[in-house]
Image (cartoon, rainbow, N blue to C red):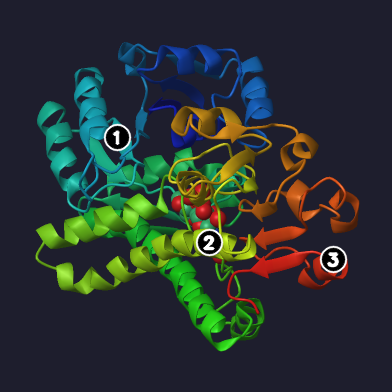
Amino acid sequence: MRISVIGCGYLGAVHAACMAKLGHEVVGIDVDDLKIADLSNATAPFYEPGLEALLRDVQDTGRLSFTTDMAAAAGSDVHFICVGTPQKKGENGADMTYVDAALHTLLPYLAPGNIVVGKSTVPVGTAARLAQLVESREPSAHLVWNPEFLREGHALADTLNPDRLVYGVSDGLEDHPAVAVLDDVYAGSLASGTPRLVTDHPTAELVKTAANSFLATKISFINAMAEVCEAAGADVTRLADAIGLDDRIGRKFLHAGIGFGGGCLPKDIRAFMARAGELGADQALTFLREVDAINMRRRTRVVELTRELCGGMLLGKRITVLGAAFKPESDDVRDSPALSIAAQLQLQGAVVTVTDPKALANAARRFPELQYVPDLDAAIANADALLLLTEWQQYRAIDPYEIGAQVSSLRILDGRNVLDAAKWRAAGWTYRGLGRP
Ligand code: UDX
């Protein structure tokens, strides 16, 4: 099939490459010249494992191209909208400027029978509004809402073999003409057994926000337990192991630590609350305010713990932060808890050095006041305390015996509870985890 993908960020670039991998002829369209120049040279504008190799593979087949010209969407049967919906400045709601602009620019190029597929995370009600615009321009075209559930760092696998496919169509019925078209698009994934659900527009939009709210709630739940464990002298990691063995609960997403960040969970729960308020259902989601508050409290808690670890004073203390990205295997620093903690420590007088295998350039753009050192040994030299804030494999693998001589004081705060506390203590370190004795 001929497919256009509008918006080539984390979602769109991966989606375009994966659609080409599935055998389709794909054009990726974005307003950003630099991004398009990179992608056209099979260079990923951000770090995502496997993406550059995939871009090279599919570009060699001639099935994938990139452009800034929306006219290239003409002739495609299916148009995916993959632009961002960031949080509005100073408000909780989602900024719909990019989605609206993408659709308006696309409208003149729609042909009879075309399918416009929204993948961006949007406030419920958006699809119905956009469907009217599509149908008023081209009565035989259809708009489908097909939310994306990919995780950064696993984006290729999540796109090629998703847990589920959700198609939101205007009447919510299996025999809607767009269903068969999307089944062709995803034939490869469906053949390998991916479950597929057809819903109406608002249900499909809500599937995404509900899923992310549930995940955020699960993380904040275990972080709330960490607060109680800290007060009671209990160990939240063993608590999570034990409750996670109940398969109604499950161990995944029960990692207590410095909390969630990134371009999705924080802004999605806020946009969801804002939208529920507009719909008169705000009471239903007041718990998400608490989920957000628990999450943000972790960051202040880490600053306080670091102060304790450093003997009650941060002023002039050399702190090395291991990890800047919001999670490992990503260079994304949007709402990164690690960086937010680093910046707070610096504000309180500590001398902060940040290291990360991939995210330093993005981090330096966002927090130019921090010191960034790419080399791990150089970054930890003479540190008064180490803070492991993003659990990259190379930090998990650090040998406490080997690095002991490089630092100034043997103090480590494990913000992700991934280190072997007994081993670090045995090597002479003062070890602090979160929610652990
Ligand atoms: C999330 C959803 O998982 C994905 O389905 C959706 O499409 C987009 O948003 P992503 O933002 O890539 O994906 O990251 P995710 O793996 O969900 O992690 C989010 C944050 O939660 C990270 O900062 C991570 O470190 C943190 N986290 C995750 C925890 O603190 N504890 C956990 O147990 C799990």
Q: Earlier in the sequence, mark 2 or mark 1?
A: 1
User: Residue drawn 46% across and 40% down?
Assistant: 184
User: Residue drawn 54% across and 52% down?
Assistant: 162
Residue 16 location (% of width, % of height):
49, 29
User: Residue drawn 45% across and 20% down?
Assistant: 27
Residue 130 shows in the view: yes
Q: Are marks 2 and 1 in contact (CB under 8 Å)?
A: no
Dot 1 amino acid type? Val
| Residue that badge 1 annotates | 116
Looking at the image, residue 60 sits to the left or right of residue 219; the answer is right
Residue 284 found in image quarter: bottom left
Residue 302: which numbered mark, if any?
2
Dot 3 amino acid type? Gly
Q: Is residue 200 above or below residue 334?
A: below
Looking at the image, residue 37 sits to the left or right of residue 355; the answer is left
Q: Along the line of sight, which residue is nearer the eye, 172 or 122?
A: 122
Report the mark closest to the observer, 1 or 3.
3
Looking at the image, residue 433 sits to the left or right of residue 258; the answer is right
Q: Is residue 142 above or below residue 112?
A: below
Dot 2 amino acid type? Val
